[in-house]
Image (spheres, helix red, strand yellow):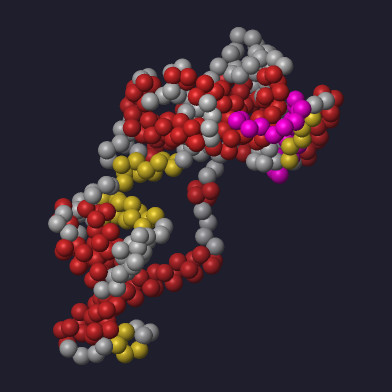
């Protein structure tokens, strides 16, 4: 079997973000609108001092009353997109309002400072990064800030990441130490790991983006990932006695199946298991040995002393081989109907994958892949 995971690796879309020209123009327009709102606040203050009408940039001549109405403008709420804002140490209500207006969280500095003055806990707002929403009501923004629920960081677990990869990412992106993570893994009961997992956390850290706060520990973060996996299994109506086998099958699907072929790969796994045929999938051996599939020798593939030697041992591997996402779990629970026993990804650029129940046809597909690989430098 070819192993697209080893070829493509995992790269998240947000890690590659490249702004388009239209996006940059849109962002520039938004920044101009935000600066305009702050400018109006300044103009209104000057007008109050001078007692005369002033000209608002690009709006013509406006009276003091009109300016003040816009300076006190407020959004209807409850908010749109999530945005992270940093509140600096020692910031006054007006300074925070200016920061939020610039971030398009509130409509005006005036509305925010009014709400700030009326909130009994506003003086206790702490510095740090907080998650708010664009276009919030000013009173809601103050209320959320007053909770002092500061964001430490975000951790994104991609589909197919192994336990080791997840732990490395948590250490890289948070203040949680590897020692603390290892201690938590060594006490799976503290994490709420289901009994069917047999104490093995591999496969149970649900792929998603997690906000890590100051109150989070290794236990709370990993427990949240495990709880999310359990919640998805319950949502899909999978009986608890099947949870571990479904997670294990889904982990193989996540590593072996190109997008669009998960259901068929799931069926190949089911068909092989039904007749006691070894799964023979490179991703299993690769996980067990901790090396890419193309570096595994023929002797290693056929070594019965290796528990993850998928060409030798029938049945599922001893543990999941990664953390599957919901699409792979769904495929494992509801495979596409078919009689297939083999599949080959014949084009790694397009992901085109062919399935068959005939070994001789499988050899033809394999040869087709080899020709393609030679022509494309693989």
Estimate the x, y position of residue 183 in percent, counting from the top left.
34, 22
Residue occupying the far top of the picture: 305
Count all numbered tags in the image, as a single digit: 0
Position of 280 with respect to 239 (left or right) is right
Residue 136 visible to the viewer? yes
Q: Which residues are magenta?
A: 332-350
The quadrant in which residue 30 appears is bottom left
The C terminus is located in which quarter?
top right
Observer-nearest of 233 and 259: 233
Answer whether residue 370 is visible to the viewer in this image: no
- In front of the other: 179 or 205: 205
Left or right of 91 in this view: 162: right
- Viewer-closest of 339 and 34: 339
Q: Residue at x 54, y 66 (%)?
A: 21
Q: Residue at position x 32%, y 27% from top?
A: 180
Q: Is residue 344 magenta?
A: yes
Q: Name the image quarter holding residue 286.
A: top right
Q: Is residue 348 above or below residue 251?
A: below
Occupied quadrant, residue 90: bottom left
Which residue is located at x 60 percent, y 9 percent?
305
Measured as percent of width and height from the top left, residue 300 is found at: 65, 15
How far across and down, in percent of the image, does residue 68 sit? 24, 79
On-image quarter of the N terminus = top right
26 lies left or right of 150: right
| Residue 12 % position (x, y) | 52, 44
In the image, is residue 80 part of the stretch drawn in magenta? no
Query: Residue at image x 28%, y 47%?
Result: 150
Q: Is residue 146 left or right of residue 170?
A: left
Residue closest to the eye, 194 or 350: 194
């Amino acid at each position: 079997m070819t192993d697209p995971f080893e070829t493509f690796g995992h790269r998240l879309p947000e890690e590659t973000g490249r702004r388009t020209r239209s996006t940059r123009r849109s962002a520039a327009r938004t920044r101009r609108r935000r600066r305009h709102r702050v400018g109006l606040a300044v103009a209104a203050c000057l007008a109050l001092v001078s007692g005369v009408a002033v000209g608002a940039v690009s709006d013509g001549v406006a009276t003091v009353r009109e300016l003040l109405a816009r300076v006190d403008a407020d959004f209807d709420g409850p908010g749109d997109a999530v945005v992270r804002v940093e509140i600096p140490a020692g910031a006054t209500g007006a300074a925070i309002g200016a920061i939020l207006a610039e971030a398009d969280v509130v409509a005006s500095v005036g509305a925010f400072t009014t709400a700030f003055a009326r909130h009994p806990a506003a003086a206790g707002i702490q510095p740090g990064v907080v998650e708010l929403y664009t276009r919030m009501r000013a009173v809601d923004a103050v209320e959320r800030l007053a909770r002092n629920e500061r964001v430490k960081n975000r951790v994104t677990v991609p589909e197919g990441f192994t336990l080791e990869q997840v732990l490395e990412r948590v250490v890289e992106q948070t203040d949680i130490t590897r020692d603390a993570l290892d201690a938590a893994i060594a006490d799976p009961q503290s994490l709420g790991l289901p009994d069917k997992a047999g104490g093995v956390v591999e496969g149970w850290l649900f792929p998603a983006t997690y906000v890590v706060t100051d109150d989070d520990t290794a236990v709370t973060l990993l427990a949240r990932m495990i709880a999310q996996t359990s919640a998805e299994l319950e949502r899909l109506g999978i009986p608890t006695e099947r949870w571990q086998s479904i997670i294990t099958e889904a982990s193989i699907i996540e590593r072996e199946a190109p997008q669009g072929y998960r259901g068929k790969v799931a069926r190949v796994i089911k068909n092989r298991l039904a007749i006691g045929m070894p799964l023979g999938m490179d991703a299993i051996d690769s996980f067990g040995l901790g090396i890419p599939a193309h570096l595994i020798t023929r002797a290693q593939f056929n070594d019965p002393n290796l528990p993850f030697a998928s060409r030798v041992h029938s049945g599922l591997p001893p543990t999941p081989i990664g953390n599957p996402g919901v699409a792979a779990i769904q495929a494992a629970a509801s495979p596409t109907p078919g009689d297939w026993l083999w599949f080959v990804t014949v084009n790694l650029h397009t992901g085109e994958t062919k399935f068959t129940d005939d070994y001789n046809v499988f050899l033809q597909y394999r040869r087709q892949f080899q020709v393609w690989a030679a022509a494309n430098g693989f």
